[in-house]
Amino acid sequence: MAVDAIIVQQAMDEDPDSLLVLADEVAEDARCTGALVGVDDEGAILVTIWDSGAVGEVEEGFRAVYGDRVRRMQLVDPRVG
C-alpha cells in the first residue's frame, strides 16, 4: 500500500512554531490522514499524509508559500495490501 505525503522543510534559523500552526490547520482537513512535526539536522520538518485526490492541490498551495522547501513523496509499506 502506498500513501501520498507532502513534506515541508524549514531552515534552522526559522521559527518552527509556524509548522506547528500549519500542522494543526491541515489536521482539520478531512483529506489529511496524518500530520507529524519533527526536527532534523536541517531544521523543523512537517510530514503530511493526504488522500490521493487531494495531494496535487495541497502540494500546489504549499509550494506557493514554501517554494522549493516542499517535497512530494509516496510512502510504501510492503506489509500492507
Image: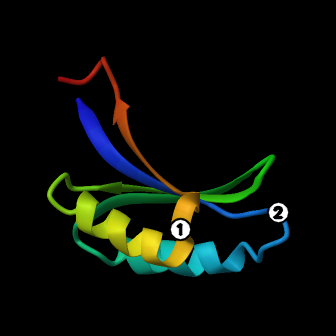
In the rendered image, residue 32, in percent from the top left (x then y), is placed at 30, 64
The secondary structure type at the circle numbered 1 is helix
Q: By what rule are the colours in the image chosen?
A: rainbow
**Amino acid type, callout 2:** Met
Q: How crowded is mark 1: few (under 14 residues within 10 Å), some or many (20 or more)?
A: few
Indicate whether 7 appears above or below 15.
above
Q: Residue drawn at (25%, 24%), measured in percent from left and top?
A: 80
Residue designated by label 1: 67
Left or right of residue 72, residue 68 in this image = right
Indicate whether 73 appears above or below 35.
above
Label 1 and label 2: CA atoms lie apart by: 16 Å
Residue contact at pointers 1 and 2, CB within 8 angstroms = no
Q: Residue drawn at (64%, 80%), measured in percent from left and top?
A: 18
- State how many labels appear: 2
Q: Residue drawn at (30%, 18%), measured in percent from left and top?
A: 79
**Amino acid type, callout 1:** Gly
In the rendered image, residue 30, in percent from the top left (x then y), is placed at 23, 71
Quadrant including the N terminus: top left
The secondary structure type at the circle numbered 2 is loop
Quadrant including the C terminus: top left
Q: Residue drawn at (78%, 51%), measured in percent from left and top?
A: 42
In the rendered image, residue 72, in percent from the top left (x then y), is placed at 41, 49
Q: 78 and 6: which one is in front?
A: 6
Which mark is in front, 1 or 2?
1
Residue designated by label 2: 12
